[in-house]
Image: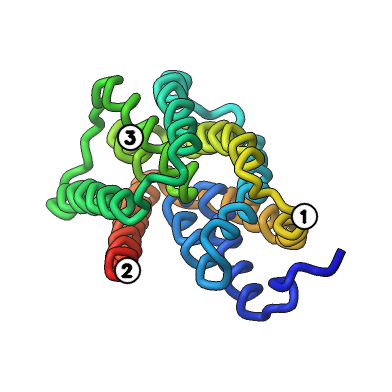
Amino acid sequence: MPDPPVLHDPWFWLLGLLAVTLIGLAKGGFSGIGMLGMPLMALAVSPVQAAAILLPLLVVQDAVGIWAFRRSWDRHVMRVMLSGAVFGVLLGYLFAASLREDWMLLALGAITVIFASHQLWIARGGRTVPSRKLPDAVGLVCGVGAGLTSQIAHAGAPPFQIWVYPQRLPRDVLVGTSAIFFGAVNCLKVPAYIGLGQFTAANLTVSAALMPVAILSTFAGVRLVRRVSPDRFYALIYWLTLMVGLKLLWDAVGLLIL
């Protein structure tokens, strides 16, 4: 079998290595920056191929994060969010051909920007962002949204953040819960990707080539996040979330113009 063309494309390697590194740091605890990985890789290959290349890497990176924070996670959050996510992944699979990616990204980006801006505005006023637990029904809807957007574009973080972040979980509990949740969601996506024929030999070859960077960058994220104080951690997370929201809006506008 001949090598996949992207293996000989320097532009792909530059973007692919950067994308996988950002995702690894996110899986290690800096949730948010990983959302930039998919758009970066999609600059070199089609979004469909980028998603297929990334999924095996995400599964392995999730395993590293789960192992590192296996003793720190919130069972209630997992139960609520994962219940919705299963349905969301199924919806994404069933309606893969008919869902408008541009409108989904526009809505998701707008909600994310409003949420992050509100949290940062409160913090800027010199107040600690209060812990607030939204109803479980909201968490269930956010779980559906996380599963759906994750299935379509590996963009499930914002719906997860909107329900979980206001609860102000301890840093390690938040990171561990996020790792286990997205590990479960990404495993749920594997049969759907197989059914859609996206795990070609060429895509898996590229995934294998990027795997060492994926693993090392996740361990780096785990080490770095444990050196950040909880207050600074949440401030950083909200800024990263705001950046992700703006990036989603930019992507949506670009798709609408085309």
- Locate residue 129 relative to residue 217 in the image: left or right: left
* Measured Cα–Cα span from mark 3 to mark 2: 34 Å
Q: Check disc 2 and report the residue beneath it.
A: 254
* In the image, residue 19 above or below residue 174: below
Q: Label 3 sits on what residue type?
A: Arg
Local secondary structure at mark 2: helix
Mark 2: few/some/many CA within 10 Å (<14, 14-19, 20+): few
**Of callouts 1 and 3, the N-terminal one:** 3
Q: Label 1 sits on what residue type?
A: Ala
Image location of residue 77, percent across then percent down: 41, 24
Whether tag 1 and tag 3 are in contact, CB under 8 A, the answer is no
* In the image, residue 252 above or below residue 6: above
Nearer-the-camera pick, 138 or 86 = 86
- Residue 168 image label: 3
Q: Check disc 1 and report the residue beneath it.
A: 201
Q: Name the residue at 59% across, 54% down.
A: 24
**Of callouts 2 and 1, the N-terminal one:** 1
Q: Name the residue at 30% across, 66% down.
A: 250
**Of callouts 3 and 2, the N-terminal one:** 3
* Measured Cα–Cα span from mark 1 to mark 3: 43 Å
Image location of residue 233, percent across then percent down: 39, 49
Asked whether the viewer can see residue 68, the reply is: no
